[in-house]
Image: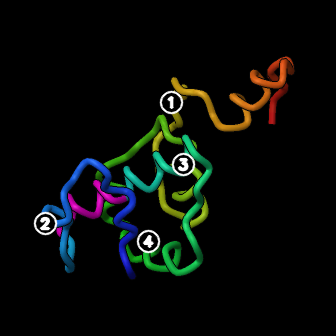
Amino acid sequence: MELDYSLYPDLEESEWPSQPLTLEEKADYIHRLCSSWDFYGFAPDRETLQELAHWGEALVCFPLLQSPAYCGLCDHLKLPHGEPEPYLGKLPWEEADELDGREPDNSPT
């Protein structure tokens, strides 16, 4: 899998992780990917999802229970995760609703 280095805006190119990734580097990449998905709606492509299916240990060892993207990714890959915790940020559609003056939809899913 080609890593999406745009997920590393805080690092210089010389600091980018090289492959093969350690377990901790995989966990960091997953965190960055899920944050991008949660906050900006950038979902991973098919190739990335297929590769993440082989990263189960990193997904399970370093849970991101406040991330809807993480919980959805684990569900998609049929990996266990703890009970999702309340999300403290605003999801993209919640921000859009707020900007457009719409009331939040608090109905159960």
Image vertical order of residue 72 relative to residue 50, above or below? above
| Residue identifier under label 4 | 52
Residue drawn at x 66%, y 38% as measured from the top left? 92
| Residue identifier under label 1 | 85
Residue drawn at x 59%, y 60% as measured from the top left? 43
In the picture, which quadrant includes the N terminus? Answer: bottom left
- The crowd level at tag 3 (other Cα within 10 Å; few <14, some 14-19, many 20+) is many
In the rendered image, residue 85, in percent from the top left (x then y), is placed at 50, 30
In the picture, which quadrant includes the C terminus? Answer: top right
Kindly identify the amino acid type of the residue bearing the numbered disc 4. Leu
What mark, if any, has residue 14 been given in the picture? 2
Would you say the magenta stretch is mainly helix, strand or loop?
helix
Q: How far is disc 3 from disc 4 in space, using C-alphas? A: 13 Å
Circles 4, 1 touching at the beta carbon (< 8 Å): no
Taking the image as shown, residue 54 lies to the left or right of residue 39, namely left
Q: Secondary structure at mark 3?
A: helix
Sequence-wise, the earlier of marks 3 and 4 is 4
Q: Nearer the viewer, mark 2 or mark 1?
A: 2
Check residue 23 for magenta coloring: yes
Sequence-wise, the earlier of marks 2 and 4 is 2
Q: Secondary structure at mark 2?
A: helix
Quadrant in which residue 2 is drawn: bottom left
Per the rendered image, the range of residues in magenta is 22-29
